[in-house]
């Protein structure tokens, strides 16, 4: 075989072998917070299995700020080709009411893909905060002028639970929003704010290291990772049982076939036994029955109504 023909044959074989890798489409997962938050942790833990399911690389893109609305604005402008999705949580539903002036609505401008996990929040305080337990903290706070509490942003679970707690406990508190849970946790650690209802996944390391104290968890049962920390119900606040969740959205007009493919991939990734064990250790609990596109749409509609009523009842002002 002439050298030139041989060279072209070898080159053709090399290109053919490389074609799947070159043509494999990357899936971009938009995270509505900084590194170290629950969404970042969850996506990193499922990424390897997700890549196998989707047949291409998974890229994490952080878009923190405004309680997740920055991420959703970014998603709204992405191409509806199934290559870009965003993880959302309770904040997205709450901010449908609390954030005014948006150019979009959750159910009108996005395509729900599915809901895959449940999350807990934990009340943390700086080690120097008064009171050995929640009752002691509340007693001390009632004697003080308004103290500041941190959250991961307007409409975040930490903001909502913080306002509900302020009313139930009868204490004066001022909300200080941050661009995600990790910097808010850092503010409590540094003493810039007094307390925070933090996502358990973002606070767990600081609690175990003794850098903050955990006084209560917001879900109905104690966390296996923090068995000594009571629930809010056990601490005297039975009506503050709040469970957060994690789901996925795609831009409006993403084809149904692409949404169903993404849902299958995320369902398989969260259900993988090895992945699920790591998620649980990080306090992220895979859903026993994940919701598909239609079920998640109905779930979101109910969550929007639920938190709109909660905001009205608690007197939480819209921004």
Image (spheres, rainbow, N blue to C red):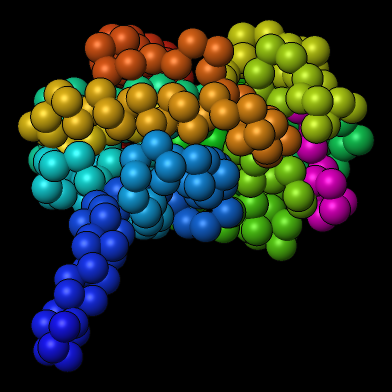
The answer to which quarter of the image holds residue 134 is: top right
Quadrant in the picture for the C terminus: top left
| 211 within the magenta span | yes
The image position of residue 122, as x and y in percent, is 69, 33
Q: Furthest-bottom residue in view? A: 3
Viewer-closest of 53 and 297: 53
Tell me if residue 230 comes above or below residue 64 in the rendering: above
Instruction: Answer left or right for 300 relative to 101.
Output: right
Instruction: Answer left or right for 248 relative to 82.
Output: right
- The answer to whether any part of residue 188 appears in the image is yes
Quadrant in the picture for the N terminus: bottom left
Magenta range: 207-216
Tell me if residue 115 comes above or below residue 288 in the rendering: below
- The answer to whether any part of residue 93 appears in the image is no
The image position of residue 297, as x and y in percent, is 26, 15
Q: Furthest-front residue in view? A: 1
Q: Residue at x 26, y 55 (%)?
A: 20
Viewer-closest of 100 and 48: 48
């Amino acid at each position: 075989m002439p050298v030139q023909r041989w060279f072209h044959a070898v080159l053709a074989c090399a290109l053919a072998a490389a074609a799947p890798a070159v043509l494999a489409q990357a899936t971009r997962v938009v995270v509505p917070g900084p590194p170290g938050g629950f969404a970042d942790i969850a996506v990193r833990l499922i990424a390897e299995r997700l890549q196998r399911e989707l047949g291409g690389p998974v890229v994490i893109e952080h878009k923190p700020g405004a309680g997740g609305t920055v991420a959703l604005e970014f998603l709204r402008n992405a191409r509806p080709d199934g290559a870009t999705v965003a993880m959302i949580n309770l904040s997205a539903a709450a901010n449908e009411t609390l954030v005014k002036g948006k150019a979009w609505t959750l159910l009108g401008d996005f395509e729900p893909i599915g809901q895959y996990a449940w999350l807990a929040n934990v009340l943390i305080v700086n080690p120097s905060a008064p009171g050995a337990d929640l009752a002691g903290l509340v007693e001390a706070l009632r004697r003080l002028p308004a103290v500041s509490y941190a959250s991961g942003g307007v409409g975040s679970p930490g903001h909502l639970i913080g306002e509900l707690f302020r009313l139930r406990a009868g204490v004066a508190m001022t909300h200080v929003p941050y661009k995600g849970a990790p910097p808010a946790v850092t503010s409590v650690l540094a003493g810039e704010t007094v307390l925070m209802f933090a996502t358990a996944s973002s606070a767990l390391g600081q609690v175990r290291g003794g850098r903050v104290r955990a006084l209560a968890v917001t879900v109905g049962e104690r966390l296996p990772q923090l068995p000594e920390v009571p629930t809010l119900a056990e601490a005297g606040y039975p009506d503050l049982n709040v469970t957060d969740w994690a789901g996925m959205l795609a831009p409006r007009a993403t084809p149904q076939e692409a949404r169903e493919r993404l849902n299958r991939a995320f369902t398989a990734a969260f259900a993988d036994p090895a992945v699920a064990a790591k998620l649980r250790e990080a306090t992220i609990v895979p859903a026993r029955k994940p919701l598909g596109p239609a079920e998640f749409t109905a779930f979101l509609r109910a969550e929007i109504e639920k938190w709109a009523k909660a905001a009205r009842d608690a007197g939480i002002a819209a921004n």
